[in-house]
Structure formats: C-alpha cells, structure tokens
Amino acid sequence: MTIRPPDAWTLRRLLYGLDVNGELDALPEPFKSMGEHLAGLNKKSRNAAWQAMLAARPERGELVDALEGIDPNKPAPETLATALFATLADVARIVSAQPWLWKGWLALGVLNAVAADPGVGKTRFALDLARRIYHGESWPDGQQATLPRGTRTLWVQGDRNFAEMLQASSDFDLPYEAVVLGSSPDEPFGSLDLDDPDTLAAIGDRIQAAAVPLAIIDTVGMTTSRNLSRPDEAREFFAPILELCQKTGVAVLGLTHLSANKEALGRRIVEKARVVIKMTQPDPEGQPDRRRLWVDKTAIVKPPALGITMGTAGNEYDFDPPKEPDPMPKRRGPAPEKLEECKTWLAAQLTPNPTRVRDVRKTAEQAGFAPGTLYAARDALGVAEYDLDDRKWWKLPAENMEPGPDPDKPF
C-alpha cells in the first residue's frame, strides 16, 4: 500500500517524539492504528514498536524509504489547500486497503466488536460463525466461503461459561477440535487475563500456530480489571490487542454488552474497533427466536441488516430482520364526570367500615360503573387493599371518609 508524504511526515514526527495535532486523526488505515499505538507509548519505546509493526507489513521497504525522505522538523509536505478536501481516490484507497474475512462485516488485522444485551445470543452467533468457517459454508448474507474446510477459530472464554460452549458446539455439529482456546493443554481454563502481556504474547503464538483467521474474546469486559470507560485505561488495554491484530493479521471479534441506551458498553471499544456489529431481540414475546443484526460502524458502505432465526443446530439468516411490534393502543380512561360520580359513590360505600372487594364490584356493576371506572376511582381516592380471612377488603383513608357514627373504628 502506498503511503502519502503527509502521512509519512506524521509517522516520522511520532517516531521523533514530536507533537502532532489533527494529523493523527487524518491518517488512513492501517497507518492510523499504527500512529495511535505509537502515540500511546513513551518516546523511548516507539522505535522498537515501529520495527515490530514493520516486520508484519508486506510493504515495509516502501515505508522505510518513505519515512527516511521526510524531515520531521519541517512543515508537512502537503499544502493546506490540498489537505482541506478528499477525493474519490481517498475513498478507494481506504476500501481497497482493508482486507476482509467476511466482507462488510469482519475485517482482518483489526479489532471488530459485537454488542448485544445479555442472553440475546452473542456467543451462539459467534459459534455459528465458527461452524460456518469450519464446514466451509457460505457467510450469513450468502457471500461465498472464503476459507478452506477445516479452518479453526480461536476463543478466549472470558465469561468462563465453558459448559454452554460445549453444549452449543455439540448442537451445532462443531467438533471440539474446531475451537482452539487461547490457553495451554495443561491449563485449558487459563489465559483469560488480557491485561497480562505474557498472556497476549502466548495467544499470538497460538493464533499463528493454529493458522486461525478469527479470534473471539467472549466477553471483552471479563478479560480485564481495567475500567474501559476511562480513556487512559482503555488505551492501555486495547493498544496491545490492536498490535496483536496487526502482527498476526487475524480478525479479532470482541463480544460486549449493550448499555441501557443501546450503545456498546464501555464506549471506548467503539472507538478502537474498525467494525461494530449490533444484535437485538426486537420482539421477545411474539418472536422469541428472532434477532436483528446490523453493522453500526464501518469505514465503508454498511451492508443490509440481517434477520437471524436462532436454531438448535445452527442459525438461519435472511434479509427481513424483525422489527419492534407496534405499541398497543392506549386504553381510554373513564370520562371525567363519570369518574367523579364513581368516586363519590365509592366513598359512600366504604364509609365507615371496610368492605369486601367482591361486594363492591357487584354493587358497582348494578349501579352502572364499569370495572375500569371503579378501579380508577379507587386509585384516585387512595383506597387501601387488605387480605383478611382469605378475602380482599378495601378501606378508605380517614381523610376521605364521609362523617359517620364511628370513622375511627379499627379494621
């Protein structure tokens, strides 16, 4: 991939420990990820990290030559007027430079994410991808398989729910050997702390040894003790993972939860991930097995959303994703004059003593008050309900009672 002179100038300044401003955000991928990683390191560590990144790049010779011809102390080689606008060439460069595992959905060499509420099916969706990869099936949207049969997937089971994985793998006809863990054979439940550099290095070795194209982190928040909502802690956590992606070329898919406002929990993962996929269950009552799947963030045109039918032996996909059901029409309350009439009537019925609910309802029906009107009057008066002798009784608060012979008679 050709690097433009202004992009080479930005990387050169980072390597020299000089300041950059908006130039870092203007870098195209993969140089933006490389620049962000360098910016997160101290000045002494940047050159070693740069050499490691170069080793994983097929165009490393071109990059070395481009940076050597740049004086980082001089102004950027591109004029301000040219830098003010993009052209279709910039779009084509970004699109063509990004390799894909599943085009439009899973990008290689970078972090991807799937966000969904707990219990909606993130793990089963990821396992279904592993099943399709291993059996050489087409991708969920019908794109042809891009990998040979027998290709395995690596899994970091941060949720520790290995029993669910074993059951789902059996249901999906996915051999246990098709899923490579990020741990060693003598400690299969280990290697779940991604804050540990040694753990990440070992996972990188296993990714390359097993030649897996996809690595799942399930879930991201369970593999770290850091607060991923804080920029500094999120940068410390994600920087080595992004470096792992670049070094191995693998598509890392981090599973995470949705917040109350349906955003990915720990919003920093949205900043770090190249592709963010969301999955929801729009109609849990009417369509409990249906899910909606769509790309919420990407650098290219978003693909059409998919519908998922969650199945015991695997998922089925279509281009007709479910929608939330139409809200039930609100029931009209009683007319104000009818409610006031019922309130007066009910207060008289409950004065001075509590009355059995069954009797009140029967009498109200005879008086021409619908149940909805009666209960609206009850709520408006603040009537209390009690259980006595296996029966329900209503009692009017003292301040709402009509004068009677003994308004304070105990219940």
Image: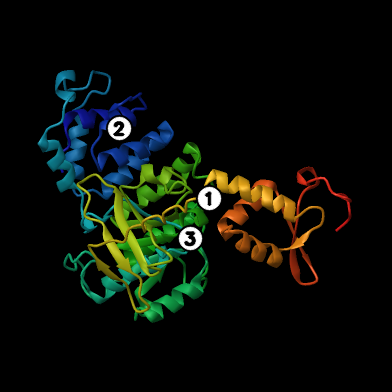
| Mark 3 / mark 1, whichever is N-terminal | 3
Q: Secondary structure at mark 2?
A: helix
- The amino acid type, in three-letter code, at marker 3 is Pro
Residue at figure coordinates x 56%, y 50% from the top left: 225
- Say above or below: 387 vs 378: below
Displayed quadrant of residue 293? bottom left
Q: Secondary structure at mark 1?
A: loop
Q: What is the distance, in whole Å, between disc 1 and disc 2 at their CAs?
A: 60 Å
Q: Which residue in the protein does label 1 denote? A: 334
| Mark 1 / mark 2, whichever is N-terminal | 2
User: Camera-side residue: 265 or 327?
Assistant: 327
Q: Which mark is residue 118?
A: 3
- The amino acid type, in three-letter code, at marker 2 is Asp
Is residue 212 shown to the viewer in this render?
no
Q: Disc 3 or disc 2, which is closer to the eye?
A: 3
Is residue 31 shown to the viewer in this render?
yes
Q: What is the distance, in whole Å, between disc 3 and disc 1 at their CAs?
A: 40 Å
Q: Which mark is residue 25?
A: 2
Residue at figure coordinates x 26%, y 39% from the top left: 31
Rate crowding at label 3 as few (under 14), some (14 to 19) or many (20 or more) other CA atoms within 10 Å: few
Indicate the position of residue 81 as horizontal and vertical percent values.
15, 19
Snapshot colouring: rainbow
| Mark 3 / mark 2, whichever is N-terminal | 2
Q: Are marks 3 and 1 in contact (CB under 8 Å)?
A: no
Q: Are marks 3 and 2 in contact (CB under 8 Å)?
A: no
User: Camera-side residue: 28 or 1?
Assistant: 28
User: Camera-side residue: 230 or 357?
Assistant: 357
Indicate the position of residue 185 as horizontal and vertical percent values.
47, 73
Indicate the position of residue 154 as horizontal and vertical percent values.
37, 66
In which quadrant will I find the N terminus?
top left
Q: Secondary structure at mark 3?
A: loop
Indicate the position of residue 72 as horizontal and vertical percent values.
26, 23
